[in-house]
Amino acid sequence: MLDTKALTGESVPRSIRKGDEALSGCINQSGLLTLKVTKSFGESTVSKITDLVENASARKAPTENFITTFARYYTPVVVGMAAVLAIIPPLVLGGGWSEWLRRGFVFLIVSCPCALVISIPLTFFGGIGAASKRGVLVKGSNYLEALNKVSVVVFDKTGTLTKGVFEVANIIPAAGYQKEQVLEYAAQAESYSNHPIAKSILATYGKPIDQKQFSGFEEISGHGISIMVQGKKVLAGNSKLMESEKIAYAACDAAGTKFYVAADGSYVGCILIADEVKPDSKCAIAELKKIGVEKTVMLTGDDERIGKSVADELGLDAYYAQLLPDQKVEKLEMLDKQKRQGSKLAFVGDGINDAPVLARADVGIAMGGLGSDAAIEAADVVLMTDEPSKLVEAIDVAKATKRIVMQNIVIALGIKSVFLVLGALGMAGMWEAVFGDVGVTIIAVLNAMRILKK
């Protein structure tokens, strides 16, 4: 049994036999494997994923930095204006050099962009700090700014919206039987096995099993198990086992892996084994829509029926199932083209297979607790507690940061504009100029520090 979760997103381990292909990046869960390497490293699955990450990163558009753009034009303009104010009027009017030089210096001091240059980066650093207090690591202020414009959020399924753990989701007993009886028969049948399904059933049963009362254990390849328990023939396995043994059973339509149990030729019940949805996933989707996210989508390598079940349960707008890593990138690019102009697309994932998509998205968000190193490396934001609801908090902090940045821009430019006019008219002296520079800077810095209390 191979755990392919990191590569394909399938919660159910995949069985392989002699002659089957095993992808690099899978984890062996049972038995001893002797593998023959058939491809060079450059052609391996993991290598192709790394290549996708590098290519996707090259296509990501960088966020425009306000300070750099503003300072490029602002500084030479105000220095030139101060020089004109100090030199041109005396030449035109004749004399009065000291007064006009004083006005020029007042103008130059007031126009110094300290308030913006200091307070805006400080606000973003404060926003990154406020997010980290909530367990959200943001790798740069441009990503914090980009979170403000997110209109589409795309999720991976396994390990992101779900726990990524293979466990008993439901027990459906046949008429005349109790859930406890179904689970007991199943646990007795699986007591000799180290298969992931067996482990999940035994963990749910949680009681010691006396194997001395069992006999005639037989593993039927591709079907299940047959065992004698105190004179009763117990069958446990898939629908093929029930059909081959001519057991009249009730087929279960729910999404997940179905494990049927029969005793003495009579159907006992069904155990549904599935990947459990995280407790806060539904709340996270609802909250994202409340704060303005227009579309929520799920991409998964898992089965179509399981994908639909999770999407319906969480209230997602769309889902795409049975996707390989390169197909996930294709779907993300399709969604990227469909999004509203000027808005951003965020992708949330945790596996090796998510790394290329994380790199390609405008904002890549990785699960930091259980996420793979490749995903965390490719991501722009990391949710350390693996809770999807942390994304809502990250966007909340980003919006608060943006509000304070805009306040500081208005405060700095507004007050400076007033003092620049007063200085040019000779109505403001050096003390006013110092307030227009240092005073405004202090006000903007104190305002920027408010984000730390967010």
Image (cartoon, rainbow, N blue to C red):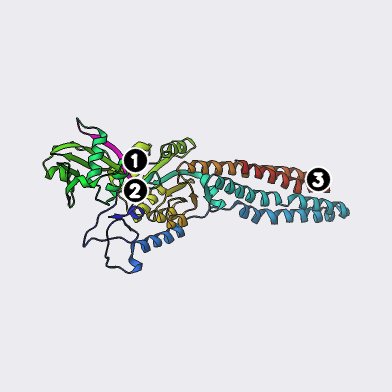
Task: Count neighbours of disc 3 (C-alpha within 10 A) and say few if under 14, some if 14 to 19, many if 20 or more.
Answer: some
Residue 336 in the image: state x and y as whole percent. 42, 49
Mark 1 vs mark 3, CA separation in Å: 63 Å
Range shown magenta: 166-175
Q: Of all residues shown, which one is farthest toward the bottom? A: 40
Type of the residue with mark 2: Thr
The residue to which callout 2 is attached is 300
Q: Toward which corner of the image does residue 48 lie, by quadrant?
A: bottom left
155 or 275: nearer the eye?
275
Looking at the rendered image, the disc whose residue lies closer to the viewer, 2 or 3, is 2
Q: Is residue 339 visible?
A: no
Q: Quadrant of the N terminus?
A: bottom left
Residue 72 in the image: state x and y as whole percent. 64, 56
Task: Count neighbours of disc 1 (C-alpha within 10 A) and say few if under 14, some if 14 to 19, many if 20 or more.
Answer: many
SS label for mark 2: loop
309 or 208: nearer the eye?
208
Q: Of all residues shown, which one is farthest toward the top? A: 176
The residue to which callout 1 is attached is 310
Task: Compare marks 2 and 3 and give the one earlier in the sequence.
Answer: 2
Asked if the residue at tag 2 contacts the one at tag 1, i.e. Cβ–Cβ closer than 8 Å, the answer is yes
Residue 165 in the image: state x and y as whole percent. 35, 46
The residue to which callout 3 is attached is 432
Task: Compare marks 1 and 2 and give the one earlier in the sequence.
Answer: 2
Residue at image coords 43%, 51%: 370
SS label for mark 1: helix
Task: Compare marks 1 and 3 and give the one earlier in the sequence.
Answer: 1
SS label for mark 3: helix
The magenta stretch spans residue 311: no
Type of the residue with mark 3: Glu
Type of the residue with mark 1: Val
56 or 325: nearer the eye?
325
Residue 75 relative to residue 296: left or right: right
